Image: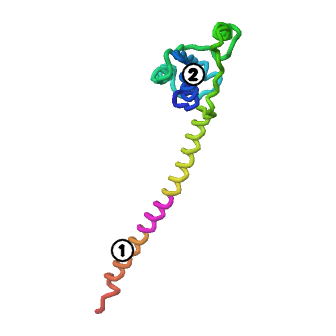
Amino acid sequence: MHISDVGHVDFLEKVHQMAKQPYIIVGLHFDQEVNLYKGKNYPIMNVHERTLSVLACRYVSEVVIGAPYAVTSDLLDHFKEPKRRGIFQLVDSGNNLTTDLIVKRIIKNRLEFEARNQKKEAKELAVLEAMKKKEEEAAQQKAGLKGPENYES
């Protein structure tokens, strides 16, 4: 989980608003596990940074480091009591923005930025080249006017 992912924040806010006395526990996966499932560029922040980021969220009461990546029957057993008491609810954040989409947007914007700067650089180089050529022509013309062939004897 990354708090920079607005979908997570929306989800936590909705959960917080649903409870009279909210106590929200967020589970974070170890870096190696995220890396295994998401790929070599993940997680973007290490577990320490993610823990501090999540704890800084006003809706979070506690963080559990090393939460399992996959839901097991043992994990589901923890929900039996809330379900029995009628307080278990599934919550949809209503937001489809993910860390993957944010990363893709950053990469796309970077590529567009680099292409735009390459065009600007090419224009600037062309202007500098034209100025240099003009200066050289002016120097040659000036030298030609002052040369011995322009003097009458």
Given residues 86 and 64, the one toward you in this image is 86
Residue 135 location, quadrant: bottom left
> Which amino acid does the dot numbered 2 rest on?
Met
Secondary structure mainly formed by the magenta segment: helix
Q: Which mark is residue 139?
A: 1
Q: Residue at x 51, y 26 (%)?
A: 45
Residue 70 location, quadrant: top right
Would you say residue 43 is visible in this rendering? no
Given residues 106 and 1, the one toward you in this image is 1
Q: Which residues are magenta?
A: 122-131
Determine whether, in the image, residue 150 is placed left or right of residue 106.
left
Task: Work out which quarter of the rendered image holds the N terminus and state it.
Answer: top right
The correct choice, above or below, for 81 with respect to 59 in the image is above
Q: Earlier in the sequence, mark 2 or mark 1?
A: 2
Q: CA distance from mark 2 to mark 1?
A: 80 Å
Residue 80: x %, y % from top left: 67, 8
Secondary structure at numbered mark 1: helix
Residue marked by disc 2: 18
Q: Residue at x 49, y 61 (%)?
A: 123
Determine whether, in the image, residue 76 is placed left or right of residue 121.
right
Residue 7 location, quadrant: top right
Residue 44: x %, y % from top left: 54, 28
Q: Residue at x 55, y 51 (%)?
A: 115
